[in-house]
Image: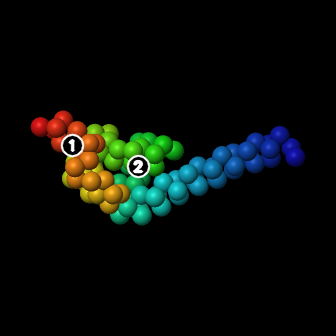
Amino acid sequence: MSGHRRKTHQHDKVCLAGTKEIKNVMLFLQDHDVSTTHAVKIYKTYGKDSIEIVKTNPYRLADDIWGIGFKTADTIAAKMGFDKESVVRCGVVFYIL
Protein backbone atom coordinates (compact mmCIF):
# COMPACT_ATOMS: atom_id res chain seq x y z
CA MET A 1 0.00 0.00 0.00
CA SER A 2 1.41 3.38 -0.95
CA GLY A 3 1.92 6.14 1.64
CA HIS A 4 -1.05 8.14 0.36
CA ARG A 5 -3.39 5.12 0.38
CA ARG A 6 -2.24 4.17 3.89
CA LYS A 7 -3.00 7.68 5.19
CA THR A 8 -6.40 7.66 3.47
CA HIS A 9 -7.18 4.25 4.96
CA GLN A 10 -6.24 5.46 8.47
CA HIS A 11 -8.35 8.61 7.99
CA ASP A 12 -11.32 6.46 6.91
CA LYS A 13 -10.98 4.29 10.04
CA VAL A 14 -10.97 7.39 12.27
CA CYS A 15 -14.03 8.82 10.47
CA LEU A 16 -15.87 5.50 10.76
CA ALA A 17 -15.14 5.31 14.50
CA GLY A 18 -16.44 8.88 14.93
CA THR A 19 -19.59 8.06 12.95
CA LYS A 20 -20.28 5.01 15.13
CA GLU A 21 -19.76 7.12 18.26
CA ILE A 22 -22.25 9.78 17.07
CA LYS A 23 -24.75 7.07 16.12
CA ASN A 24 -24.55 5.47 19.58
CA VAL A 25 -25.06 8.82 21.32
CA MET A 26 -27.98 9.75 19.04
CA LEU A 27 -29.69 6.38 19.55
CA PHE A 28 -29.25 6.56 23.32
CA LEU A 29 -30.70 10.06 23.49
CA GLN A 30 -33.56 9.30 21.09
CA ASP A 31 -34.48 6.29 23.27
CA HIS A 32 -35.11 8.87 26.00
CA ASP A 33 -37.17 11.14 23.70
CA VAL A 34 -34.46 13.77 23.31
CA SER A 35 -34.99 15.76 20.12
CA THR A 36 -32.43 15.53 17.34
CA THR A 37 -31.61 19.23 17.78
CA HIS A 38 -30.84 18.76 21.46
CA ALA A 39 -28.99 15.50 20.82
CA VAL A 40 -26.66 17.26 18.36
CA LYS A 41 -26.00 20.05 20.87
CA ILE A 42 -25.28 17.47 23.58
CA TYR A 43 -22.85 15.58 21.34
CA LYS A 44 -21.10 18.79 20.26
CA THR A 45 -20.67 19.77 23.91
CA TYR A 46 -19.65 16.46 25.48
CA GLY A 47 -18.43 14.37 22.54
CA LYS A 48 -17.72 10.72 23.33
CA ASP A 49 -18.57 11.32 27.00
CA SER A 50 -22.17 12.34 26.21
CA ILE A 51 -23.86 9.12 27.28
CA GLU A 52 -21.97 8.82 30.56
CA ILE A 53 -22.56 12.48 31.49
CA VAL A 54 -26.28 12.33 30.72
CA LYS A 55 -26.67 9.02 32.59
CA THR A 56 -24.84 10.38 35.63
CA ASN A 57 -26.45 13.82 35.82
CA PRO A 58 -28.88 14.94 33.12
CA TYR A 59 -29.32 18.23 34.98
CA ARG A 60 -25.85 19.29 33.78
CA LEU A 61 -27.49 19.87 30.42
CA ALA A 62 -29.28 22.92 31.83
CA ASP A 63 -25.98 24.45 32.94
CA ASP A 64 -23.81 23.49 30.00
CA ILE A 65 -25.97 23.70 26.89
CA TRP A 66 -27.67 26.80 25.59
CA GLY A 67 -31.30 26.07 24.77
CA ILE A 68 -31.74 23.34 27.36
CA GLY A 69 -33.24 24.63 30.58
CA PHE A 70 -34.20 22.97 33.84
CA LYS A 71 -37.61 21.90 32.54
CA THR A 72 -36.11 20.05 29.54
CA ALA A 73 -33.35 18.50 31.67
CA ASP A 74 -35.96 17.45 34.24
CA THR A 75 -38.08 15.81 31.52
CA ILE A 76 -35.03 13.92 30.23
CA ALA A 77 -34.13 12.86 33.77
CA ALA A 78 -37.67 11.61 34.42
CA LYS A 79 -37.61 9.55 31.21
CA MET A 80 -34.31 8.07 32.36
CA GLY A 81 -35.87 7.02 35.66
CA PHE A 82 -34.57 9.74 37.98
CA ASP A 83 -36.92 10.20 40.92
CA LYS A 84 -38.44 13.62 41.63
CA GLU A 85 -36.86 13.32 45.09
CA SER A 86 -33.43 12.49 43.64
CA VAL A 87 -30.47 14.08 45.40
CA VAL A 88 -29.19 15.27 42.03
CA ARG A 89 -32.50 17.00 41.22
CA CYS A 90 -32.89 18.49 44.68
CA GLY A 91 -29.38 19.89 44.49
CA VAL A 92 -30.20 21.64 41.22
CA VAL A 93 -33.47 23.05 42.55
CA PHE A 94 -31.66 24.32 45.65
CA TYR A 95 -28.98 25.89 43.41
CA ILE A 96 -31.65 27.68 41.33
CA LEU A 97 -33.33 29.10 44.43
Relative placement, left or right, of 29 versus 11 is left
Which badge, 2 or 1, comes first in the chain's sequence?
2
Q: Is residue 23 visible?
A: yes
Numbered circle sitting on residue 55: 2
Q: Is residue 37 visible?
A: no
Question: What residue sits right under mark 1 in the picture?
Answer: 90
Relative placement, left or right, of 83 versus 49 is left
Instruction: Kindly indicate the quadrant of the structure image that contains residue 36.
Output: bottom left
Q: Which residue shows up at 73% across the image and 44% down it?
A: 10
Q: Which residue shows up at 59% across the image and 49% down it?
A: 18
Q: Residues within 10 Å of mark 1 (few under 14, many from 20)?
A: few
Q: Secondary structure at mark 1?
A: helix
Q: Residues within 10 Å of mark 2 (few under 14, many from 20)?
A: some
Residue 26 position, x and y percent, is 46, 58
Which residue extends farthest left?
Answer: 97
Q: Amino acid at mark 2?
A: Lys
CA gap between label 2 and label 1 equals: 17 Å
Q: Secondary structure at mark 2?
A: helix
Mark 2 touches mark 1? (CB < 8 Å): no
Q: Nearer the viewer, mark 2 or mark 1?
A: 1
Quadrant of the frame with the C terminus: top left
Q: Which residue shows up at 28% across the image and 42% down it?
A: 88
Residue 2 position, x and y percent, is 86, 44
Residue 93 position, x and y percent, is 18, 42
